[in-house]
Image (tube, rainbow, N blue to C red):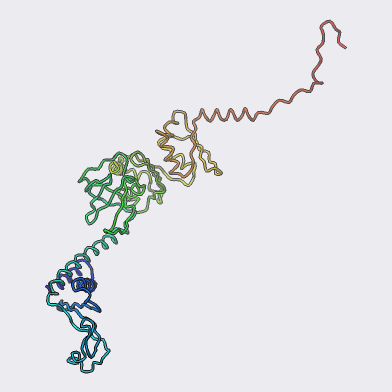
Amino acid sequence: MNLELLRALDQIEEEKGIGKDVIIDAVEAALLSAYKKNFGTTAQNMRIEMDRTTGEMRVYQVRTVVEDVDDPTLQIALAQVREWDPTAQVGEMVEVEVTPKDFGRIAAQTAKQVVVQRLREAEREMVYKEFRDREGDIVTGIVQRIERKNVFLDLGRIEAVLPPPEQIPREGYRQGERAKAYVVEVRQGTRGPQIVVSRTHPGLLKRLFEIEVPEVYEGIVEIKAIAREAGTRSKIAVASRDRNVDAVGACVGPKGSRVQAIVDELRGEKIDIVAWSPDVSQFAAAALSPARVMRVEISEATKTALVIVQDHQLSLAIGREGQNARLAAKLTGWRIDIKNETQIREIEAQKIFVDLPEEEPVPAEAVAAPVAADEPPA
């Protein structure tokens, strides 16, 4: 058994990267605990050693050299010690081998438990190290089960949990189907690494574009901002670092193939791709796509953009339940106030009326007294 154990430890060291000495130290510590459990209060000042060559396990106890032994569990007679050490003196401490006859059975069982435990801990540590650097990355998993509205994805070596707040509203999950998710958090728990993923995070959209659009992955096209309402609509602002590359066109792809692949992955979520601009007026106008904007007036003091559209474009600019305007505001970081032409004309007319100068009153003495018809003029 001992040689088999050593061979097993060599194999574990090669395949799992766990040092053999680390496991042997753990086995010795576990054996000491097992020995004390089996032999009670007599197991004091003990040390257990495993031979690195043969695998033999021996138990040693530290005892005090005395002339006459009162406590055989803690003392040893001088005459007995001098059989192997003629220079021994009373009061010295010596190690005596006290390996029990049936210790092999205890050792085998304990060693197996320790090796299994160490393997489990090492697997968890390796998985944790693998995934802790993947926060902010995309993983692809298979829906394994759904418990209390939590969706568990099988990532191969570990499970990831997709909690309800991170699920796209009204998106169904079926056991066995594949799904991409964004790694939000990786933490070390008592039962091993815990991976929390999301389908609603804006980072998922960014990573999908990096996967589908080579120009984004290579850094030629930069994603400047993302505004997302998962499951319904998203807006993404892009800019090109190469004047020969159209950022929006690159993200849309031939016949819309690239963006359509992302829409399919997000199960029909609409995506507006707009050109980013350092000019807030231009950026705000683009952010309200697909509405056409006539002009934009900027107020730096209130960080507000007054956007003026044609009358028939107002509902399109605002969007259903204000979604288009809301996403545009998130995308630009500015408060957006949308008015149509008619509203602007009314506002301007009221302003002109308010600003008109009031007529000065005519002095009383300047008003001529009425002249009677039968009286001659003075």
Q: State which quarter of the image contains the C terminus.
A: top right
Residue 282 appears in view: yes
Q: Is residue 359 left or right of residue 173?
A: right
**Residue in the foreground of this view, choosing between 242 and 167:** 167
**Residue in the foreground of this view, choosing between 92 and 248:** 92
In the rendered image, residue 179, in percent from the top left (x then y), is placed at 25, 47
Q: State which quarter of the image contains the N terminus.
A: bottom left
- Rendering quarter of residue 191: bottom left
Please identify the residue farthest to the front as the structure is shown: 70
Q: Is residue 318 left or right of residue 175?
A: right
Check the image and report above or below for 369 versus 294: above
Please identify the residue farthest to the top as the structure is shown: 374
Q: Is residue 105 left or right of residue 196?
A: left
In the rendered image, residue 281, in percent from the top left (x then y), is placed at 49, 41
Check the image and report above or below for 240 versus 90: above
In the rendered image, residue 85, in percent from the top left (x then y), is placed at 20, 92
- Rendering quarter of residue 264: top left
Q: Is residue 221 left or right of residue 131?
A: right
- Rendering quarter of residue 249: top left
**Residue in the foreground of this view, choosing between 246 and 96:** 96
In the rendered image, residue 126, in percent from the top left (x then y), is placed at 26, 62
Label count reads 0
Write the residue at 79% across / 18% down: 367
Write the residue at 24% across / 64% down: 121
